[in-house]
Image (cartoon, rainbow, N blue to C red):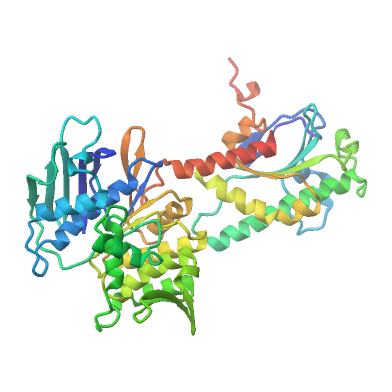
């Protein structure tokens, strides 16, 4: 579990300190404020720690991280990730299970990360990044584009997810902690997705009926992806799940239900980082924080930098709630003026 | 009926121009009605040049139920709807001379109901800004049938706090001189 994060001069994240992160963490802010960038920066670091010394992996943490940053952000050279106009280098540090992982590199860096310190023991867990768009329809295209042609386009968050979905259940059965969450997810969409080995394609199964993935609703596929990763045991109770715009393609009722599942999984130990523009995500997480007396840290990109708060204690001033109030005032004005 | 300020739910409304406000909840007419009819606080006529006369049906509350109590919230909305619709109905019934009360102010008696507009207004004292939009949505939804069957222009519902009530001229901005200690 990540405990705290500090980032300087990393793309749009010129200075960001998030001291007390929790099991569920929410990132909000205007378009282009760096929400997705933050999630990808964290994902790159976490996956570096998870790939380091796994199986026969011989690469150093610095080598893995360099590759991860290159294929996740897809710059010409990783030095291009240093914030425009910044005087200093990228400085990234985080505590994982109270152990330090940090690195830094300057604008001239092509590939070699010289400054890195890793006190985190090798991890056997898998973390995942769920992008705003579903990947099932493009599953084969993503794998071919990256594994066969090795071209930019689909970044590592897509490739890793496509590979994670390809992992078949290992026969150990469903992780007991996840059975309730999986039932809830399958109830939201009314079925689940399955990979047809012969036809080499995904299909959506609802009762006894099977549907082509191409004609299955986007929101259904998004929910089904999380369900599949719980079912094939790619994810476990120590996984960290990054979800970019969980609200995309989902109707408000499904958003609330998905947040309930997130809370359920968080209570089992899984950690979540969500970025969102949605009133429903913010409001539902606020209610979950109250109902469960649960800390849900929130970080908001504002004019004065990144501002931290906790939904358990307050609904912080934020552009999502403010816009709902602005629309409300507009309506009242139309009624009473 | 009244040019005196109306004190309800910890807020002081008015005073309004003579004949503009009908304090329906404290009227003899309402007192004589059979029990079980819940009533909003007052009716208020708003005149604006170039616009149809608008009749506001106003209810005031000192608080709302805690947001987490879904059943209480539904009961609260239901009660508000009943009070607002009852006050609206009683006001219209008076205008149509279905009651023989002499309390109805003169401007109401000459109101052209076919072209007048109507608003249902709830004022909640000290209500947090972020709690207002969902309350507005819930009350609008609850009053939908009344708004559509009476062909009221929309938006016909406004849920506001004391701060906004000042902005819209329901609560005076300064305390009344009569309340000030003599010097």
Image coords of residue A22 (percent x, y): 27, 55
Q: Quadrant of residue A330?
A: top right
Location of residue A233 (image quadrant): bottom left
Q: Where does residue A335 sit, x and y in percent of width and height?
A: 69, 39
In the rendered image, the quadrant that contains the N terminus of chain A is: bottom left
**Going 48% across and 59% down the picture, which residue do you hit?**
A249
Q: Which residue appears at 8% of the width and 48% of the height? A: A116
Q: Is residue A125 above or below residue A26?
A: below
The quarter holding residue B156 reads top right
**Left or right placement of residue B117 versus residue A155 in this view:** right
Observer-nearest residue: A259 or A311?
Answer: A259
Whether residue A216 appears in this view of the structure is no
Task: Name the spot of residue A238 as percent of width and height, x first.
Answer: 22, 66
- Which residue sits at x=64%, y=24%? B176
Q: Is residue A126 above or below residue A178?
A: above
The residue closer to the viewer here, A276 or B31, is A276
In the depicted view, which residue is nearer to us: B141 or B83?
A: B141
* Residue at the image position 36 percent from the left and 36 percent from the top: A302
């Amino acid at each position: 579990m990540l405990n705290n994060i500090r980032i300087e001069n990393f793309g749009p994240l010129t200075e960001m300190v998030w001291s007390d992160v929790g099991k569920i963490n929410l990132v909000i802010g205007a378009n282009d404020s760096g929400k997705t960038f933050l999630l990808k920066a964290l994902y790159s670091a976490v996956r570096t720690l998870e790939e380091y010394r796994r199986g026969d992996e011989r690469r150093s943490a610095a080598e893995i991280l360099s590759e991860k940053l290159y294929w996740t952000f897809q710059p010409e050279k990783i030095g291009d990730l240093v914030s425009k106009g910044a005087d200093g280098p990228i400085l990234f540090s985080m505590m994982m299970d109270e152990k330090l992982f940090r690195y830094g590199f300057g604008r001239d860096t092509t590939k070699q990360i010289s400054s890195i310190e890793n006190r985190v023991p090798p991890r056997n867990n898998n973390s995942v990044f769920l992008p705003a768009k579903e990947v099932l329809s493009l599953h084969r295209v993503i794998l071919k584009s990256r594994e066969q042609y090795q071209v930019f386009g689909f970044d590592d968050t897509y490739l890793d997810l496509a590979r994670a979905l390809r992992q078949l259940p290992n026969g150990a059965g469903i992780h007991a902690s996840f059975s309730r969450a999986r039932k809830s997810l399958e109830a939201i969409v009314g079925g689940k997705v399955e990979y047809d080995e012969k036809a080499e394609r995904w299909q959506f199964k609802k009762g006894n009926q099977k549907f082509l993935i191409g004609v299955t609703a986007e929101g259904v596929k998004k929910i089904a992806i999380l369900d599949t990763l719980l079912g094939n045991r790619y994810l476990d109770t120590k996984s960290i799940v990054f979800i970019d715009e969980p609200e995309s393609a989902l109707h408000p009722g499904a958003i609330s239900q998905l947040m309930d599942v997130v809370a359920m999984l968080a209570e089992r130990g899984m950690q979540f980082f969500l970025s969102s523009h949605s009133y429903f995500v913010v409001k539902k997480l606020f209610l979950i924080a109250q109902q469960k007396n649960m800390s849900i840290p929130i970080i908001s990109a504002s004019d004065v930098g990144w501002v931290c708060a906790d939904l358990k204690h307050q609904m912080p001033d934020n552009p999502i709630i403010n816009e709902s109030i602005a629309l409300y005032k507009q309506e009242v004005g139309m009624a009473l003026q | 009926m009244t040019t005196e300020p109306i004190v309800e739910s910890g807020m002081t409304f008015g005073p309004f121009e003579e004949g503009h406000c009908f304090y329906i909840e404290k009227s003899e007419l309402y007192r004589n009605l059979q029990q079980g009819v819940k009533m909003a606080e007052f009716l208020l006529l708003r005149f604006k040049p170039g616009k149809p006369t608008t009749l506001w049906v106003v209810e005031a509350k000192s608080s709302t139920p805690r947001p987490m109590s879904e059943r209480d919230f539904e009961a609260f909305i239901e009660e508000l709807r009943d009070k607002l619709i009852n006050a609206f109905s009683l006001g219209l019934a008076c205008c149509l001379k279905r009651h023989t009360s002499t309390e109805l102010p003169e401007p109401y008696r000459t109101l052209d109901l076919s072209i007048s507009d109507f608003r249902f207004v709830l004022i909640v004292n000290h209500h947090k800004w972020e709690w207002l939009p969902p309350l507005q949505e819930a009350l609008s939804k609850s009053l939908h049938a009344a708004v559509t069957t009476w062909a009221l222009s929309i938006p016909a519902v406004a849920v506001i706090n004391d701060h906004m009530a000042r902005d819209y001229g329901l609560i005076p901005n300064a305390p009344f001189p009569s309340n000030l200690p003599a010097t």
